[in-house]
Image (cartoon, coloured by chain):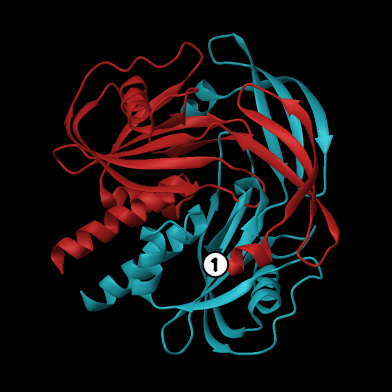
Chain colours: A cyan, B red
Amino acid sequence: MMKETNLHEKTVSSETIYEGRVITVKIDEVRLPNGNLAKREIVNHQGAVAVLAFTDDDRMLAVRQFRKPLERTIVEIPAGKLERGEEPLACAKRELEEETGYTAKTYEHLSSFYTSPGFADELLHLYIATDLTAGVARPDEDEFVEVLHVTLPEAKELLANGEICDAKTVLAVYAWENRKLSANA
Amino acid sequence: MMKETNLHEKTVSSETIYEGRVITVKIDEVRLPNGNLAKREIVNHQGAVAVLAFTDDDRMLAVRQFRKPLERTIVEIPAGKLERGEEPLACAKRELEEETGYTAKTYEHLSSFYTSPGFADELLHLYIATDLTAGVARPDEDEFVEVLHVTLPEAKELLANGEICDAKTVLAVYAWENRKLSANA
């Protein structure tokens, strides 16, 4: 606790400069441990979930989608934003079914992590889903995704060629490989 | 390429609403594949690096620091923002030395990934650094960090108790475990 106190930055003032549908942006002025003042640019986000879903033949479900901030199409594990007040597990189930059509009997929480703690408070909850049943995808009207079923070697190829290139999906592939290596150890 | 085209969102208009030191925020109006219009809230970021640095006695260098967006102190691998025009590897070397005092003879690129592609274009380059030499940390005047040397079991404990809780560091711990399991396989 001593350490926490010594590193703490106290808010002196806070100005909200944008409130959108996905993000809120604010500028905080803070008092640093050395007494100096500094500005912190902060993006608030509702949080999100992602699902590492395995079919019975050991393939990972993935979606290819266009990401406007990157101006390109990438391959990711199914994911989505939390609705206000929504439980992460309920959101995981909803997003998996909406984007891929699959439902899962078994969910296991793997990890929850902040995606970019330097400027954003987005917390992402990652689940492993197994015992899948195929169904019909029903994405939001304005959501366009292509569903893929990839083996671990294919996932590593997508990682190598840069189509898998976001933190949660890279992390999911590492976690998958890790589980396989542990099982064989 | 066909697929790319079908998923693409064309920019109709773009409005910059904030230009800060760390982030720029803009709102794009886009034409969706179905012809509908939609708004995209986008955070532009210069990009960043992170370093998974191993001491000769197989400990990972980590830093404990206060993160204003989270209003708490967390444990991360050394990392920092790219300066304009800076090469990622040069940035990795600079940040490792500034934050921990260590220099490394050997750098290996592990992965580069977008931290939160739904709303931000931040690309993070992750390196593994070995053959370390200790030195004197010289953080920026307004940067306050505590340096830790953690074993893999300690890193997994920090992960379990939530002190390690950001994407790059969770990913780094998985990658570390992965390498160990592969070496023993």
The residue carrying mark 1 is A77
Q: Is residue A164 left or right of residue A26?
A: left
Image quadrant where residue A37 sits: top right
Residue toward you, A77 or B142: A77
| Residue at 51% over, 14% down | B142
Image quadrant where residue A181 sits: bottom left
Residue toward you, B33 or A3: B33
Q: In the image, is residue B59 above or below residue B176?
A: above
Quarter of the picture holding the C terminus of chain B: bottom left
Residue A66 screen position, x and y as percent = 64, 59
| Residue at 44% over, 46% down | B168
Q: In the image, is residue A154 above or below residue A39?
A: below
| Residue at 75% over, 34% down | A25
Quarter of the picture holding the N terminus of chain B: bottom right
Q: Is residue A8 left or right of residue B127?
A: right
| Residue at 34% over, 48% down | B155
Residue B28 screen position, x and y as percent = 78, 43
Image quadrant where residue B2 sits: bottom right
Q: In the image, is residue A32 above or below residue A114?
A: above
Q: Chain of mark 1?
A: A
Residue B144 screen position, x and y as percent = 46, 20
Residue toward you, B13 or B102: B13
